[in-house]
Amino acid sequence: MKDTQPHIAWQLDDKSASLTIMYGGRVLIHWDLSKWAAVTPGRLAVRRVIAWDFVKTSHDRHHPMTSWDETLENQQTVIRLSDRLSRHHITLTFTALGSWHIAIRIKTSHPDQFIRMVWLTEENDSWQGFGEHTHSIRPPARFDSWVEEGPVGWGFLSRIFKHTPWFPFPKGPYASYASLPLWLSSAGYSAWFTSFERIRWNLQQTMRSATVWGADTTLHVIAGHTPKQVLSRQFLVLGTPSPPGPWVLAPWNDSIQGQQSALTLARFLREHRIPSGTLWIEDWMGSHQDDRRFWMRPLTHQVDTDLYPDLPDLSQTLHAQGFRLLGYFCPEITEGTDLYHQALRDDILVKDRVGNPAVIKILGINHGQLDLTHPSAFTWIHDHLLYPALQLGFDGWMADFGEYLPLTAKLSDGTSGTVSHNRYPLLWQAIHRQFWRQYRPDDEYVFFVRSGWIGTHRLAPVVWGGDSDTDFEEGDGLPTVIPEALSAQVAGFFYWATDIGGYMTFGLTRPSTKSLFIRWVQAASLLPVMRTHHGTAAPRNWRLDRDSETLEIYSRYARLHTALYPYFHHLCTLAEQMGWPLIRPLYLEFPEDKTSWRLDQEFMVGDGLVVAPVLTSSSSSHPIYLPSGKWRSWWTNKVYEGPQWISENVPLDQLPVFIRDPFFVPLLEGVPATGTDAGISQMEGVVDSLSPITTGPGVGLNRALDYLALYLCVSNTAYQKLFRLPDGGYLRLEFQPLPQIFSKPLRLPSPVFSDHFPQFASFGTTVLLKPGESHEIRINHGIMTLSASEDSRKRQYILRWW
């Protein structure tokens, strides 16, 4: 049979000095070979500014390519570029790995050289991703693929310095904990380099260059007809992240300053019916706090028994109440501590260029850093860090840092910091992954990271955006969170989180305010992982219990986040099977909409919700873009026809959320309120944890899954949806519009806690479905048929519609 599938092809044009890669007759990549060069680097200069390295080479010698020839060697196309004197060469070897996937090995003839390559692009060719960035990368842009501390804002001076090259401090907008050489192009492809060396990018509108600081790299190119197809194929190659346990998708709350504080917080959350599934005690190894600041030093990696006299008992108590317990680790150990001296004796620390333990300064304090290439690295970390913590009752932890390996470092495997700097986060994360898979192969654990490289998505269950400033400023405050989240999705960081309220109160940045905290809560509530943080100015930062209004609003969005668990679970299944992120840039669903490629302040949850959080201090004229189709406001029931921009005056307690029409949203409404009939009862409307609760008040996931609410947007359009159920099997919904007008259906009472659910969905009914059963329901405009798969469970479905 003739193969009708399009294939990636490439064509060398000797006259125009161009190399073109195509798919289905469409140009993906156009390289100008006359602008390629082998680069002999000059002297390397490194200048350290606090936590950032400024790196450059001087007196580089560029050897431009002037001629090229194409041959076939071992069934592979080889294109050889040469300079004028034929002393320097760049060889490109093409390997077809499928109809839509090629790998191009790019190598210079001298092992000490760099590779400079140049793309010619259409002005409207949008490149998305490059890892996780607080500012969307748009031409003109210069940046490095290099993991390092993220940027820091200038506080209230940010608006003055925003157009200077040192804004944000100190390297501009593109410093990142996870700056990866992986991008998605609107031309119809994604691509990534496999080498760990620094890559220096210069993106202009129609000419874009990358200089790989190495002599040998491989570029993978994945083609597709739509961005979603490209991502599916990309993650078929790179692998998809494993879905976390249900409890990871319930809100996380931080607790510091002792065991009693954690118990008090847990009791407060349950008594106030505020959903939470995790307590994170960052300072289990000790901390200090005065009336202005909180700091966690020294990094001993051993329990502080004054603050936490009985961690196993704390863990057992929290587990019974439906909480998991998380702690903290990093690969640095404070000098002078017992563990540091043990690391010296075992020769497990990174060395400097003369063979002494490298000194890592964090906030002015000296630390040693674990050499993760050492043959005994896993065993040592297992014995001295991770296993003792497991015995204390932890279910996971923050696996912090990973981006501090000095360029001058010498590692046990013979590599230098220059070569292994970007590899170090993967080594750090692989140790934690190996540890947890050994002790909890059922995946009942979590660790979360901030630094990353290509492959982090397969190692770390959760990625968070690092140390944001506690303000509304564009430097590193709340407005940077959604660009960070969206860029991270291209790299596969599907289970992504932010520090609610921000973390860093430094220099001119002030502590978090009430409005900042609330707006951050709202933005985080529709992310897959919702988690609070106390921040460096913990005594002065705003908290969820600071006043009654804040508590009410926080509770509302914690309940919303938890109620969305069935939808998130459905999206987790698609993420694993299809490679589609849970939260999505609008261009994934509306690639033909040019506006969608420029949006970085709103996002979609799956293909059914548009979320446009308020990210500034002003909300009187909040701009919202709605793509093509009909969109129903979650809160007001007002329907908008897209595509259009709207401007809304958004109250402090409201997060702009819009439901696609037609669509349905599966939600948890908890269990029937006490004393009501389970058949047509009023539901409680709150689920306290996505783990079982065996002691004290609250409803756990095991009880809540006896009921499932379906909020339906129905119109005169036929549609069908397949929904993956949280505890196995699927539910098929088919709607068929009919011209007849039926009598008004039963009005179901709203849940007791109802302010977080879509408003005005006042019509409804209940259906008890057994595995393999179907049921028809007559609603306003037609017939809805529900069909449960044979491998589902008996459950009562609550249908509500407008």
Image (spheres, grey):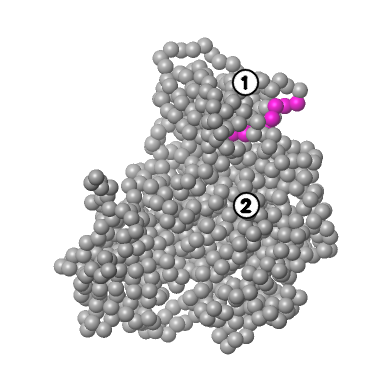
Residue 386 position in % (x across, y down):
69, 64
Q: Nearer the viewer, mark 2 or mark 1?
A: 2
Looking at the image, the residue that sits furthest to the left is 15
Question: Residue drawn 77% across and 40% down?
Answer: 694
Instruction: Residue at 72% x, 27% y: name it.
Output: 673
Please name the predominant secondary structure of the magenta segment in the image. Answer: loop
The magenta segment is: 665-674
Q: Magenta stretch containing residue 668, yes or no?
A: yes
Q: CA distance from mark 2 to mark 1?
A: 39 Å
Considering depth in this image, is 243 or 530 the residue closer to the camera?
243
> Please, is residue 87 above or below residue 387 in the view?
below
Q: Is residue 317 visible?
A: yes
- Is residue 584 something that shows in the picture? no
Q: Element type at marker 2?
A: loop
Residue drawn at 37 percent across, 67 percent down: 218
Residue 440: percent from left, percent from top: 66, 55
Report the residue marked by disc 2: 443
Q: Secondary structure at mark 1?
A: loop
Where is residue 310 shown, x and y percent of the image?
A: 83, 58
174 horizontally vs 88: left or right: right
Q: Which residue, given by chain and number where applicable, does mark 1 sit on?
A: 748
Q: Quadrant of residue 683?
A: top right
Q: Is residue 115 left or right of residue 259?
A: left
The stretch drawn in magenta includes residue 773: no
